[in-house]
Image (spheres, grey):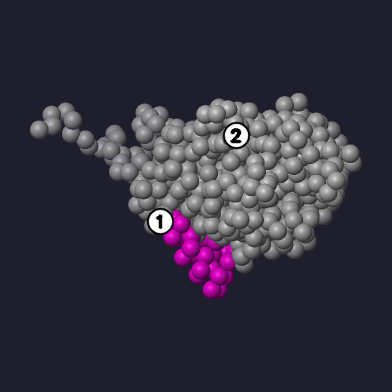
Amino acid sequence: MAARTHTVTNQAPPLVSYDLFRADRALVEAVDRHLEGPLLDEARDELSALGRTSGSAQVQKWGELANENPPRLRTHDRYGERLDQVEFHPSWHRLLGKGVSAGLTAAWTRPGGHVRRAAGFVVWSQVEAGNGCPLSMTHAAVPALRADPALAAEWEPRLTSLVYDQDPRPAARKAGVLFGMAMTEKQGGSDVRANTTAARPLAQDGTYELTGHKWFCSAPMSDGFLVLAQAPGGPTCFLVPRILEDGTRNVFLIQRLKDKLGNRSNASAEVEFDGTWARRVGDEGRGVRTIIGMVAATRLDCVLGSAGLMRQAVAQAVHHCTYREAFGGRLVDKPLMRNVLADLALESEAATTLALRLAAAYDDGGEQERAFLRLAVPAAKYWVTKRCTPVAAEALECLGGNGYVEESGMPRLLRESPLNSVWEGAGNIQALDVLRALQREPEALNAYLQEVGRARGADHRLDGAIKNLLTELADLGGVEGRARRLVERIAVVLQGSLLVRFAPPEVADAFCASRLGGDWGSSLGTLPHTLDLAAIVERARPVS
């Protein structure tokens, strides 16, 4: 018989066995907004199925096991032959297989594919974010390969397949493939034009031999990689297959796996090329321009991944406070805690709404939307990914000491939270990219202003913020030193305009009052107390 002191009371039940998609009102409404007719019905059913899978106890356990059992590198076999093989826990393969079969690499081939995939990526990121990297790289390789129609015709059907085939075989003999990317080097970092990996042309047209070292290679177990190297004509993009057509291994020497803060289930590696066979993608000397389509797509995935992490952090915090009692009542009903939860919910909804708007622009594909993405993607990447860490930390605190314990899952979210801000160009890189768009591509600013202008007149604080932003944009002299401040305003004004148009009045009012009107403190949980905070928290509660 258990001792009376071991009777467990006043603990929140596990947040499990629920539909992560249906439980996220902001995400559901965004999908409804950007899709219609039979396509919407199909997407709802598909995303709800993924939501139920993601919320199941079994799949949640897979995420835990993949995180607790990180990949291992085997450089050689017992006889001393090079293997350069990364071994993963079975749960990793199960997760990756589910992600592929859910269409998270198939956006380019389906109607409404980017919105459907974006919503799925937000949902799936909440299970275990580590497997998002190969899904993202594979999805993003498509626009880069389209610089060479012959290569695209050969590889795109494999990249967009719904089949996960983990066996190391020539790509032509596989039902589906995964792609990685290797751009940065020790001496260059984000300055990829400083790369020293050399590409020597071979006799066969379009083929080369690569020699060099890559400091970061994402998803090194993949079937192919997009790589930047210095060809005779300058920085050039190359496709490096893992296994050659004759079944032999390409020279792809994995030197070590990175020991990372978070993202533990995913392998990131340093790799060596030493006579490695590669095919050119696009023209010599235009490698950065060729690969930029991949970079833009992965930057959007950074926004989506951060939105997913924020949503899961907020869901856990609201769920806990709904059941936990203190000082004579439920935590969720305490005015101070309600303020914190509402502030967290605002940040999460703003991130989700913006991310799905960007995905819809990809589906549209028109000239206006492409110009809009040129400015909006780096601005959103800068801002949304930076908001992820304070949201995760504050949500963890809502659980008190329970949140600091690994079993709660909150420490895993917190360790993961800075990643998307670092990957695909850290904050300063995004800010400088926005400046380039402002200075060189006036159509990008015009498209942005038309977008935020659709909400003019609906909220005086938004109108004032747009006016102040226009004043800042009128003088770009010496702008680099204030670039972060400017890019932050660009992103927040865009979020505010979307919420004013599409969110419930209590959400839009709170966002504009705090983020645009200045009635806000220096930490989360400092919203004006006169707002309808209870409605905001209830909207964020994970009930499907």
Quarter of the image where the C terminus is located:
bottom left
Q: Where's residue 64, x and y in %?
A: 41, 39
Residue drawn at point x = 86 percent, y = 36 percent = 477
Q: Which residue is drawn at the image coordinates 64% and 63% (left, top)?
A: 109
Residue stretch in magenta:
29-51
Inspect the image, locate mark 1, and give the three-letter code of the amino acid beneath it: Arg
Q: How many labels does the image show?
A: 2
- Residue at figure coordinates x 83%, y 49% from the top left: 204
Q: Residues within 10 Å of mark 1 (few under 14, many from 20)?
A: many
Describe residue 365's horizontal placement relative to residue 504 as left or right: right
The answer to whether residue 155 is visible is yes
Whether the magenta-drawn stretch holds residue 318 is answered as no
Q: Where is residue 334 in the image (x, y as percent from the top left)?
A: 36, 39
Say what secondary structure mark 1 lies in. helix
Quick check: can you spot residue 318? Answer: no
- Would you say the residues marked 2 and 1 are in contact, meaning their CB atoms lie under 8 Å apart? no
| Residue underneath mark 1 | 52
Give the residue pinned by disc 2. 84
Q: In this view, does 458 lie to the left or right of 152?
A: left
Residue 389 x %, y %? 54, 35
What amino acid does circle 2 point to?
Answer: Asp
- Tell me if mark 2 has few (under 14), some (14-19) or many (20+) residues whose alpha carbon lies within 10 angstroms of its own: many
Marks 2 and 1: which is nearer the front?
2
| Relative depth, front residue between 384 and 469 | 384
